[in-house]
Amino acid sequence: PASFARGLSMTGPEPQLIPLRFQWAPGNQQITITPLRYLRLGEQYTINLQGLEAADGGVMETLQRSFDTIPSPAVVYAGPPNGDLSAGDPVFALRFASPMSQKSFGNRITFSPPLPDSRYYYDEYENTLYYYGLQPSTRYEVRVQPGMFDIHGNAINTPTTVSFSTAPLESSAYLDMP
């Protein structure tokens, strides 16, 4: 409908309107709205729809919906925390701000000393990469190099370095009796 084209707009962090293209699905019950330029990462945008003609000839209320674009890829947590001197869990975790491409991890994450058995798991729902097999009573330095990228191809540009020590094994004794 013509009133739709006149009443549709999108705003973001910049003062100017964002140009849009839209297409109705058959039956005019669903619409796809596509911005004609890239939206900035980690920003809020608002779609406004005003002045639509109602079926009874009146004008519908203004409809406004906001959404956030995904954040720029970054390491938002590396743990155990930097400087921790008694990390008890033999797991190192990297949490990312956005969903990451596992193919981009490669050799961009290094442990010093190296892990004897570098096993890791990437949790797609938490955007978190877990490394297992940390040794007890060991001081680690983990370097995360730039170049990893999210599932949309946006790269992490900032290196991250974390140092921590794992806790010693707890003493234990077993008594085996007949």
Image (cartoon, helix red, strand yellow):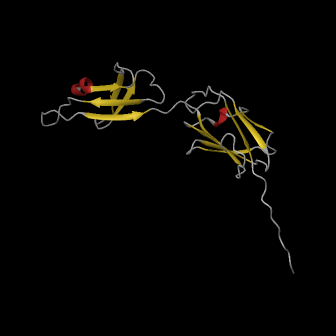
Whether residue 167 sits left or right of residue 104 in the image: it is right
Name, please, the residue furthest toward the bottom.
178
Up the image or down, 33 lies above or below 133; here it is above
131 horizontally vs 54: left or right = right
Residue at image location 58% in from the left, 43% down from the top: 124
Residue placed most toward the observer, 167 or 22: 167
| Count of numbered circles on the image | 0
Q: Quadrant of the C terminus?
A: bottom right
* Position of residue 11 measured from the top left corner of the image (x, y, whole percent): 35, 25
Viewer-proximal residue, 40 or 166? 166
Left or right, residue 41 beside residue 46: right
Residue found at the very far top of the displayed protein: 16
Please indicate whether residue 6 sits to the left or right of residue 107 in the image.
left
Q: Picture coordinates of residue 31 (x, y %)?
A: 33, 33
> Is 87 above or below relative to 54?
below
Quadrant where the N terminus lies? top left
Task: Give the farthest residue toward the left.
Answer: 57
Quadrant hosting residue 62: top left
Q: Residue at x 75, y 51 (%)?
A: 167
Q: Position of residue 82 (x, y in %)?
A: 67, 39
Q: Is residue 10 above or below residue 76?
A: above
Q: Nearer the viewer, residue 86 or 32?
A: 86
Q: At which x and y percent is residue 20? A: 35, 23
Q: From the viewer's side, name the closer residue of 101 and 94.
A: 94
Snapshot quadrant of residue 165: top right
